[in-house]
C-alpha cells in the first residue's frame, strides 16, 4: 500500500515494525468529543478513523445538520445519523460532512430523522458500551438494526465494514444532502448540484458542489461494494425512483438493497478527490485495491506510531493519554488535498499539480501558529516545508498568504496574517525544502497587499487601526504588529536593511493604542480620540467590537515580540507583576461573554488562544514561580482524559500543542524567535527525536500535583538559572533536568538581566 511509504517520505519518520513501542495504545479518540454540560466547551473533536494529515476522516455524525459542535459528533447524543468521510477537528465552525453512508434493515427510510424523535428516519440509537475507537479504527453497534459498523481509512479512501443480521431487507443509504446547518445565517450552506450514478451492481460514483464555510467546494467520490446490491432506489427530495441509474439535484440520495445472511459482512470502500471522479478512482486503485480491513487498520496504526514515537514520554497513565491523544489531534489537520498523482484544486479554481504530491489546507493559523506550528518544526520539519510550499501557492494567486484556509479556499475567518510567523519561524530555523527568497516575497506581500481585515494603508497612515474604519481594531493592531516583527526578522536575515527598519517601526505600533489612563490597549477612531465608553471586561466576538473573541484584559498581554517594551509601558516589573496577579484573580465578568470563552482562571481563559502565552510572562518579570504555579494549574485542572478533556475548542491541534510543550516544561511565548519560556513540567521524562541523530531529553525528579515548583535546573550537567531555553539547546541534543518541590525556590530564575525579553535569531 503505497501511502505508508509516501507518508514516511513526507515527514521523514524512520519506522520499523521491530522498533514499534505501541504509543498508539495511549490515544483515546473520545477525548474532547463532548462537554459534561451544555454550558462548557470540550474540544469539538471527532472519534472516527483517519491517518496523519489524511483527506479522509471517516467518523459518525450525531447531528442531522451539524452546527455546534463543529465536528458533527457529540458524545452526549443518543443516536447516530450515519458515517461521513470528511470532518473538522476542534474547530468552532462546522463544515464538510461529505458522502454520508448509513446501513439499515427493514422498511426503506430515506429521511435522516430527528435526534429527539425515537425510531425516526434512518438514524439509529447507540450506546457507548457498544462503541470503541483507536487510531485508524472506529466501531459502534447500531441498536435499531443490530448492525455492527466498523470504519478505517487510508489517506484518501474510507473503508466500512458492516456486519448485518439475516435480512432480505438490508440497505445502505448514500446521502448527498447531509451537510452543516443549511439555516445558518453566516457562511450560508447550499448544495448547488450533486450526482449519483450506478456504474454496475457493485459501484456508485458521484459528486457534489456545495457552499458553506468554504465558499465553493467540489467533492468527488467512487464507492465500491464487496457484495452486489440486488436493486437500488434513487431519491430526489420526496420523489423516489426504483432502478434509476443516475440522478442529479440538490437533495439526492441512493438506497442500495441487499439480501444478507446472519453475521454477513458487507464492505464498502469510498475514494475521495477534490478534482475529479477519475482521480477518486485512481486514489482508490492506488491506496486500497483490495478488501483486507485488518490490514488497513494495521497500516493506519503504523502511520500513527511513526508520529507518536517522535516524542517518548513517561508519567502517569492519564498524563500519557492526554499527551499522546494531543499529539494525535495535532496531526489530524491540516489535510492533504492532493490526489495520489499530485493533482489539486488551486485557489484560482484551476487544477494544478504538486510535484511532492502534497497540497495542505484546513489552516487554522490564528490558533496553530502559537504552538502547533512550532511543534511541527521540531518533529516534522519536512511537513513544515510542504505546508509552506502549499501556503505560497495562495500567494501566487491572491498576492498574500492564507489567513484561514479551508478546502483550498480562503474564508477570512480570523484576523492577522499568521502564516507569516509560520514561514518566518521555519526560515530562521533553517528548515529546508522551500525557497526562502520567495518566502520573504510572500510574507512581505502579505504585509502590504490590502485584503479583508488588513487595511495596510490605514495602518501606515495612522500607526494603528481605527475602529471606525475596521472593527476588531485593537486585536488587529497588536497582532499585525507582531506579524510585522516577524517580517523584519526575515528581512534582517536576508540583508534587506530598509525593509527591516520599516517593519520594525511598524512592530511598535501597538504602543499607539496604549491608554496610560486606563492601563489597557484601547480603540481609537480616525480623529485620534479614544472610543468611549470603555469597559475592559466587555467581550468582543468576530466583528462589531475592538476585541476578537476576548476582552481588553486578555488582549493586554499580546506583545510577544517585545515583552520588555510591554513591561516598560506598565511601569516596570513590580507594576507588571501586580497587573498579572490581578488578571489571574479578577473574576468579575459582564453578563455576556464570547462563546469561545471558557476555562477561566480569573480573566485568563484557556479555552481560547489569546490567553495561551500569558501564564509564562512572569518568567520575564522576575517571578517565575508564578509561571510554574499557573501553568501547572492549567494542566492539572483544565485537561483530562474524558470526553470533556479540553477547556475549549481544540482548534486543529493548538490546545493539544500547548499541553505537549507545557507538560515537558517549556513553551514558545514568541513562536518565531527560537526561545521557549520555562514553566512547570508535569511529566517525569521526555525525549524528542530530532531526526538528525540527536535527542533532546527532559528529566524531572519528584513531579506531582503538589510539587509544581522548580527547586533547581541543570542543562547538560551544569546548574542553570535562566527562565528559558533556546532552539539551539533543543536541536543540539541537550539534556534538561528539573528537581521539583511543593514550595517556590525564590532564588531560581530571578535574574531578569538575562531574561529572553527580546532575544532572537
Image (cartoon, helix red, strand yellow):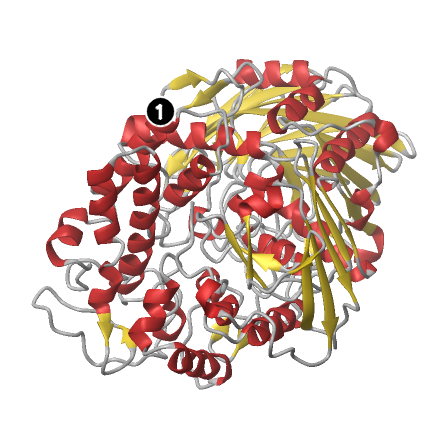
- Near-viewer residue (357 or 198): 357
Q: Determine the residue positioned at 77% across, 17% down.
A: 290
Query: Number of marks in the image?
Result: 1
Mark 1 neighbour density, 10 Å: few (under 14) some (14–19) many (20 or more): few
Q: Determine the residue positioned at 78% across, 40% down.
A: 149
- Near-viewer residue (671 or 63): 671
**Where is residue 723 drawn, in percent x and y?**
55, 64
Please identify the quadrant where the N terminus is shown: top right
Residue furthest to the right in view is 262
- Near-viewer residue (381 or 53): 381
Pointer 1: what residue?
Answer: 349
**Where is residue 206 drawn, in percent x and y?**
54, 23
Using the rendered image of the protein, determine whether residue 175 is visible from the camera's viewpoint.
no
Residue 134 is drawn in which quadrant? Answer: top right
Q: Determine the residue positioned at 41% across, 32% down.
A: 391
Using the rendered image of the protein, determine whether residue 635 is visible from the camera's viewpoint.
yes
Mark 1, secondary structure of its residue: loop
**Where is residue 601 drawn, in percent x and y?**
54, 77
Residue furthest to the left in view is 527
Residue 235 is drawn in which quadrant? Answer: top right
- Near-viewer residue (225 or 117): 225
Residue 709 to residue 649: above or below: below
**Where is residue 620 drawn, in percent x and y?**
46, 68
Please identify the quadrant where the C terminus is shown: top left
Left or right for 155, reference 559:
right
Left or right for 32, reference 507:
right
Residue 432 to residue 616: above or below: above
Amino acid at each position: 500500500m503505497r501511502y505508508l511509504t509516501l507518508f514516511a517520505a513526507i515527514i521523514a519518520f524512520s519506522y520499523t515494525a521491530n522498533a514499534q513501542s505501541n504509543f498508539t495504545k495511549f490515544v483515546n479518540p473520545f477525548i474532547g468529543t463532548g462537554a459534561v454540560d451544555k454550558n462548557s466547551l470540550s474540544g469539538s473533536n471527532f472519534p472516527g478513523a483517519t491517518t496523519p494529515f489524511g483527506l479522509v476522516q471517516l467518523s459518525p455524525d450525531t447531528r442531522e445538520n451539524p452546527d455546534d459542535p463543529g465536528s458533527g459528533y457529540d458524545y452526549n447524543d443518543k443516536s447516530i445519523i450515519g458515517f461521513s468521510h470528511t470532518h473538522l477537528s476542534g474547530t468552532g465552525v462546522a463544515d464538510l460532512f461529505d458522502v454520508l453512508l448509513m446501513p439499515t434493515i427493514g422498511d426503506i427510510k430515506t429521511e435522516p430523522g430527528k435526534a429527539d424523535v425515537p425510531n425516526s428516519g434512518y438514524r439509529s440509537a447507540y450506546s457507548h458500551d457498544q462503541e470503541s475507537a483507536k487510531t485508524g479504527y472506529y466501531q459502534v453497534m447500531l441498536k435499531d438494526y443490530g448492525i455492527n459498523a466498523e470504519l478505517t481509512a487510508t489517506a484518501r479512501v474510507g473503508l466500512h465494514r458492516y456486519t448485518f443480521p439475516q435480512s432480505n431487507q438490508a440497505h445502505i443509504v448514500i446521502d448527498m444532502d447531509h451537510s452543516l446547518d443549511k439555516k445558518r445565517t453566516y457562511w450560508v450552506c447550499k448544495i448547488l448540484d450533486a450526482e449519483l450514478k450506478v456504474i454496475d451492481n457493485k459501484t456508485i460514483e458521484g459528486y457534489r458542489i456545495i457552499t458553506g464555510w468554504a465558499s465553493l467546494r467540489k467533492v468527488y467520490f467512487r464507492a465500491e461494494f464487496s457484495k452486489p446490491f440486488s436493486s437500488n432506489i434513487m431519491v430526489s427530495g420526496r420523489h423516489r425512483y426504483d432502478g434509476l441509474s443516475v440522478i442529479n439535484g440538490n437533495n439526492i440520495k441512493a438506497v442500495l438493497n441487499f439480501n444478507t445472511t446472519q453475521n454477513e459482512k458487507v464492505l464498502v470502500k469510498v475514494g475521495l478527490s477534490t478534482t475529479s471522479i477519475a482521480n477518486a478512482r485512481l486514489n482508490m486503485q492506488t491506496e486500497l485495491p483490495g478488501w483486507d480491513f485488518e490490514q488497513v487498520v494495521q497500516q493506519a496504526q503504523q502511520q500513527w506510531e511513526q508520529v507518536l514515537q517522535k516524542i517518548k514520554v513517561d508519567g502517569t497513565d492519564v498524563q500519557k493519554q492526554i499527551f499522546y491523544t494531543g499529539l494525535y489531534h495535532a496531526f489530524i489537520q491540516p489535510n492533504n488535498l492532493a490526489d495520489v498523482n499530485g493533482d489539486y484544486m488551486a485557489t484560482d479554481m484551476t487544477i494544478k499539480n504538486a510535484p511532492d504530491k502534497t497540497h495542505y489546507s484546513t489552516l487554522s493559523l490564528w490558533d496553530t501558529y502559537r504552538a502547533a506550528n512550532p511543534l511541527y518544526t521540531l518533529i516534522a520539519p519536512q511537513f513544515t516545508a510542504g505546508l509552506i510550499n502549499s501556503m505560497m501557492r495562495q500567494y501566487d494567486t491572491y498576492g498574500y498568504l492564507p489567513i484561514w484556509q479551508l478546502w483550498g479556499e480562503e474564508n477570512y475567518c480570523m484576523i492577522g496574517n499568521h502564516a507569516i510567523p509560520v514561514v518566518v519561524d521555519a526560515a530562521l530555523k533553517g528548515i529546508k525544502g522551500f525557497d526562502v527568497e520567495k518566502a520573504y516575497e510572500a510574507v512581505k506581500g502579505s504585509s502590504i497587499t490590502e485584503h479583508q481585515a488588513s487595511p495596510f494603508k490605514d495602518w501606515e497612515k495612522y500607526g494603528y487601526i481605527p475602529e471606525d474604519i475596521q472593527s476588531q481594531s485593537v486585536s488587529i493592531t497588536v497582532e499585525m504588529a507582531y506579524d510585522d516583527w516577524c517580517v523584519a526578522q526575515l528581512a534582517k536575515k536576508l540583508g534587506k536593511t530598509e525593509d527591516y527598519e520599516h517593519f520594525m517601526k511598524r512592530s511598535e505600533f501597538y504602543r499607539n493604542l496604549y491608554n496610560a489612563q486606563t492601563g489597557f490597549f484601547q480603540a481609537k477612531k480616525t480623529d485620534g480620540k479614544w472610543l468611549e465608553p470603555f469597559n475592559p471586561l466587555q467581550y468582543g466576538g468576530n466583528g462589531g467590537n475592538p476585541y476578537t473573541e476576548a476582552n481588553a484584559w486578555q488582549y493586554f498581554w499580546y506583545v510577544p515580540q517585545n515583552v520588555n517594551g510591554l513591561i516598560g509601558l506598565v511601569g516596570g516589573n513590580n507594576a507588571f507583576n501586580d497587573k498579572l496577579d490581578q488578571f489571574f484573580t479578577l473574576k468579575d465578568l459582564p453578563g455576556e461573554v464570547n462563546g469561545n470563552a471558557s476555562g477561566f482562571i480569573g480573566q485568563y481563559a484557556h479555552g481560547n488562544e489569546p490567553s495561551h502565552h500569558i501564564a509564562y510572562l512572569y518568567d520575564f518579570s522576575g517571578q517565575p514561580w508564578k509561571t510554574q504555579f499557573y501553568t501547572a494549574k492549567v494542566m492539572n485542572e483544565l485537561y483530562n482524559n474524558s470526553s470533556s478533556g479540553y477547556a475549549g475548542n481544540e482548534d486543529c491541534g493548538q490546545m493539544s500543542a500547548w499541553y505537549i510543550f507545557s507538560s515537558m516544561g517549556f513553551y514558545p511565548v514568541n513562536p518565531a524567535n527560537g526561545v521557549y519560556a520555562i514553566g512547570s513540567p508535569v511529566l517525569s521524562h521526555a525525549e524528542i527525536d530530532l531526526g538528525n541523530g540527536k535527542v533532546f531529553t527532559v528529566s524531572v525528579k519528584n513531579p506531582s500535583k503538589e510539587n509544581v515548583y522548580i527547586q533547581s535546573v541543570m542543562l547538560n550537567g551544569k546548574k542553570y538559572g535562566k527562565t528559558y531555553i533556546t532552539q539551539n539547546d533543543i536541536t543540539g541534543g541537550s539534556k534538561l533536568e528539573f528537581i521539583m518541590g511543593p514550595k517556590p525556590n525564590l532564588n531560581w530564575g530571578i535574574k531578569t538581566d538575562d531574561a529572553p525579553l527580546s532575544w532572537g535569531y
